[in-house]
Image: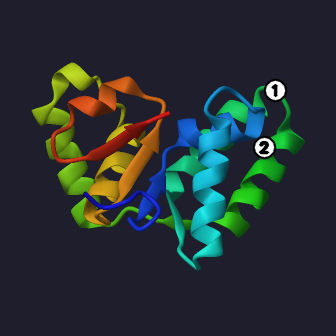
Amino acid sequence: MINMIEQKILFDTSSLLKLVINERGSEKVSFLMEQNLRKNRENLASTITVFEIVSVMAKRNIQGAVSAVSFFEKACTFLPPDIKIAQNAALMKEKYPEANLSLADAIILQTGIECNAKIITADREWKKINEADVELI
């Protein structure tokens, strides 16, 4: 098995939000991000995560949302969905109705799958997706 530090890592919105609001699991997210940066490895995230961060944080503090996105823009490489990701995300959403995936969840998961990355998330339902390498925080 590949060590998580050696493998590509894609951070889901839930993991990045834990870091921003210092919730349980934020230490692990911070550790993984810092390790990747020290080893000159990219921290990956979907551009859909930017939408979700702003949507969640703007309700509390619009300036905090802008600051969070600015911080993550420096720490992560954001990957936009392409046609292949969109198509495969839709098929995955249909294949796993029990996972109750939103459009954003399906695209973020599929982005991780396409990148052969371990996906760091707090969403337990994602473990139902056989094609994804999911690590719960």
- Residue 84 appears at what percent x and percent y? 22, 64
Position above or below: 137 against 9? above
Camera-nearest residue between 55 and 25: 25
C-alpha gap between disc 1 and disc 2:
8 Å
Position above or below: 57 against 78? above
Camera-nearest residue between 20 and 59: 20
Of the 4 image quadrants, the one containing the N terminus is bottom left
Left or right for 136, reference 26: left
- Residue placed at 54% from the left, 48% from the top? 49
Q: Secondary structure at mark 2?
A: helix
Q: What number of labels is visible?
A: 2
Q: In which image quadrant can residue 62 be found? A: top right
Instruction: Please give the residue where the numbered disc 1 appears in the rendered image.
Output: 60
- Residue 103 appears at what percent x and percent y? 36, 38
Q: Secondary structure at mark 1?
A: loop
- Residue 105 appears at what percent x and percent y? 38, 39
- Residue 124 appears at what percent x and percent y? 37, 25
- Residue placed at 47% from the left, 62% from the top? 5
Amino acid type shown at disc 2 = Ala
Q: Earlier in the sequence, mark 1 or mark 2?
A: 1
- Residue placed at 66% from the left, 37% from the top? 26
Q: In which image quadrant can residue 24 be found? A: top right
What is the number of the mark on residue 65? Answer: 2
Amino acid type shown at disc 1 = Arg
Position above or below: 29 against 73? above
Q: In which image quadrant can residue 113 be found? A: bottom left
Residue, far bottom: 40
Left or right for 97, reference 136: left
